[in-house]
């Protein structure tokens, strides 16, 4: 059980001190580059997997910025020292341990790691008893608005419209469905809790039933992330789509979430809270 966080020194001139978990990955390096341009953010720690070939390297040099004086380390606990917020883009198997450490050290958590298992989700819930926690399968502010639009459209259109979701990502993505697709499934279930989620269709599956919704994953090329929710009625259809054209949009969202979370009370937060 996490201990109540000890009192730590307040911020210096409004600066939020930030640690990165999964720091050497694409998202970690994107956040590093963008944070360098923000005078209110200081990166103080960088944690990586113990098998990462980039261990021991200066984070700024990895991001093409020159030396920052922050070295990538497998020691997560020491990487969190002095931080107010940790931003996590790692692997699902690493999230539970991070949540326990951050809660013990009184550090707010912003996590964009997708496809969390039940123990990881419970660990975040437990951490939220003592520190603020924000988890989102997609840190894009636009995706949050898309989810809200899906809920509004379903309420307005009623049960006469079928729902299907298609997500498209680059060939190297290792998980499916995407965290964003799962977020959109959640939006649908907020309006239609009885919906059954299918992971595609194959063979003679029979006619579509009113309570089913398929989620299709497409992989190829260098696509950052496209998501479309189809609302299919008789004689018409709506296609609500979000397309990511630059990975920095997720880093922008994560940094905005970190700035929002600094100094907040313990509890679970969402991107909707960041948008106000």
Image: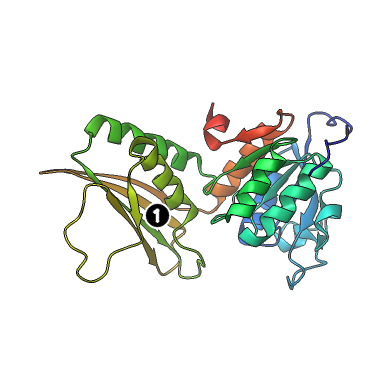
Q: Residue at x 65, y 61 (%)?
A: 93
Measured as percent of width and height from the top left, residue 133 is found at 66, 39
Mark 1 residue element: strand
Q: Residue at x 40, y 40 (%)?
A: 187
Measured as percent of width and height from the top left, residue 228 is found at 33, 50
Of residues 263 and 197, the one drawn nearer to the viewer in this rendering: 197
In this rendering, the answer to whether 115 lies above or below 274 is below
Measured as percent of width and height from the top left, residue 40 is found at 74, 35
Of residues 150 and 19, the one drawn nearer to the viewer in this rendering: 150
Q: Is residue 105 visible?
A: yes
Location of residue 223 by image quarter? bottom left
Which quarter of the rendered picture does the N terminus lie within?
top right
Farthest residue toward the top?
276
In this rendering, the answer to whether 174 lies above or below 248 is below
Measured as percent of width and height from the top left, residue 267 is found at 66, 33
Location of residue 18 by image quarter? top right
Left or right, residue 43 beside residue 198 = right
Location of residue 49 by image quarter? bottom right
Of residues 246 and 276, the one drawn nearer to the viewer in this rendering: 276
Left or right, residue 22 beside residue 138 = right
Which quarter of the rendered picture does the C terminus lie within?
top right
Tell me the colour scheme of the image: rainbow
Farthest residue toward the left?
235
Q: Residue at x 77, y 46 (%)?
A: 102
Q: Which residue is mark 1?
A: 226
Q: Is residue 30 visible?
A: no
Residue density around tag 1, few if under 14, some if 14–19, many if 20 or more, within 10 Å:
some
Left or right, residue 212 beside residue 173 = left
């Amino acid at each position: 059980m996490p201990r109540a966080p000890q009192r730590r020194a307040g911020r210096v001139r409004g600066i939020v001190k930030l640690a990165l978990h999964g720091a050497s990955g694409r998202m970690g390096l994107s956040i590093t580059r963008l944070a360098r341009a923000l005078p209110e953010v200081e990166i103080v720690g960088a944690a990586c997997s113990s098998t990462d070939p980039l261990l021991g390297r200066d984070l700024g040099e990895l991001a093409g910025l020159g030396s920052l004086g922050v070295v990538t380390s497998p020691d997560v606990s020491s990487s969190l020292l002095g931080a107010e917020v940790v931003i996590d883009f790692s692997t699902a198997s690493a999230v539970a341990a991070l949540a326990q450490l951050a809660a013990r050290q009184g550090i707010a958590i912003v996590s964009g790691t997708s496809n969390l298992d039940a123990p990881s989700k419970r660990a975040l819930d437990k951490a939220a008893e003592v520190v603020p926690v924000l988890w989102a399968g997609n840190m894009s502010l636009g995706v949050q608005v898309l989810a809200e639009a899906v809920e509004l459209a379903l309420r307005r259109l009623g049960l006469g419209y079928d729902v299907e979701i298609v997500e498209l990502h680059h060939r190297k993505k290792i998980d499916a469905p995407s965290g964003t697709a799962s977020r959109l499934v959640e939006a649908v279930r907020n309006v239609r809790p009885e919906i059954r989620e299918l992971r595609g269709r194959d063979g003679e599956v029979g006619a579509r039933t009113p309570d089913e919704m398929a989620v299709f994953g497409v992989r190829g090329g260098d696509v950052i992330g496209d998501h479309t929710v189809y609302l299919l009625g008789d004689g018409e259809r709506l296609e609500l789509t979000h397309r990511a054209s630059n990975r920095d949009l997720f880093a922008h969202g994560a940094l905005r979430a970190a700035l929002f979370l600094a100094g907040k009370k313990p509890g679970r937060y969402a991107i909707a809270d960041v948008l106000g």
